Image: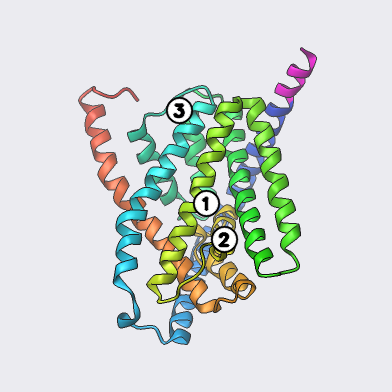
Amino acid sequence: MDAVLMGHFISNYLGAKAASVFDRLNAVVRRFAPQILIGALIIFLAGCFYSASRMGLNADSIKIGPLAVLVMVFGPLSVLYAALGLVLLAKSADTSIPLRRAVAISASATLAEILPMPGGAIVRTGALIASGAPPMRSTLLVLVTAILWISLATLGCGLALFSNEVAVAPLLIALGGGGMALTLAWLIRSAGSANACWTLGHRLAGMLLLALRLKLAFLVLGLSVPLLDTFPFALAIIAGSAAGVVPAGLGLSEALAALLAGSVAIPSAFAFLAVAIDRLMCLGTSALATLIVLPRRINSITDGTVNS
């Protein structure tokens, strides 16, 4: 019994610490928000222009078929994937969020990444709290699943680099595997083995979805990249977004992708633009999903058919 009480105490303590870190980060970021936003846009636009110029890219160079599949198939799939993740988070918190509401919230969370702060995490945590989950538990679940996501991306990146005989690969594999093991252990203790397994399966499916999106983004530029070699760029996207101080990871994610491109023998200009295409597709699809789902939800609330 003492061990159980100690576990709850540690969870609450870590949740309070995480919330405190979020608050401090938000205060600093809000102070410099205009400068951060302008700087990120400059880096993103300048990087896109430079990469396109270096590649000799023009409108005729864009492959319409892969672009159509990326936008029309993988865009909606990504929105649905994010919504299912929120449904699973709510289940792990011993509450529930309906799928339609989860779609609206998840799309809004993706758009909130545009803000120079961890907007997506704040939106998801707020949604869990609004659904009846305790604040500290909500904060910890969002934080731990984010660490699991980063760990899987690190593990995938390590495997890709290992296949390309890069020296740092074993370290990345160890870090990714260790992070995955620790977060799963916490989820099993906190949410039960079934929810932990569902969460892991969902995140693994998400890594495959992201890798396929990136493969298509490279095909849009006329470059065929092995699926495994897209994982370093998946890590770049996730790490850029996780930084929380650059809007949607734009600029930072692309720069990280360009730096990692040489490790899998891909030109840095292609990597920068492929990640930019993927990020813009996600933002555009999320904006469209928000416009479609939110008005319907507002109307249903007004009509008294949905309890908020």
Q: CA distance from mark 2 to mark 1?
A: 8 Å
Dot 1 amino acid type: Met
Q: Residue at x 61, y 52 (%)?
A: 28
> Residue 308, relative to residue 229: is it above or below?
above
The prevailing secondary structure element of the residues shown in magenta is helix
Callout 3 secondary element: helix
Q: Residue at x 49, y 27 (%)?
A: 91
Callout 2 secondary element: helix
Give neighbour class at mark 3: few <14, some 14-19, many 20+ (Cα, 10 Å).
few
Across and down, in percent, residue 106 comes to 41, 42
Query: Quarter-wise, where is residue 279 in the image?
Result: bottom left
Callout 1 secondary element: helix
> Residue 24, relative to residue 126: is it above or below?
below
Residue picked out by circle 3: 130
Across and down, in percent, residue 79 comes to 38, 47
- Choose between 140 and 89: the one closer to the eye: 89
Q: Are marks 2 and 1 in contact (CB under 8 Å)?
A: yes
Question: Which circle, 2 or 3, is nearer the viewer?
Answer: 2
Q: Residue at x 74, y 52 (%)?
A: 174
Residue picked out by circle 2: 231
| Magenta-colored span | 1-9
Q: CA distance from mark 1 to mark 3?
A: 28 Å
Query: Quarter-wise, where is residue 19 in the image?
Result: top right
Q: Quadrant of the N terminus?
A: top right
The answer to whether one can see residue 42 in this image is no
Residue picked out by circle 1: 207
Q: Which mark is residue 194?
A: none
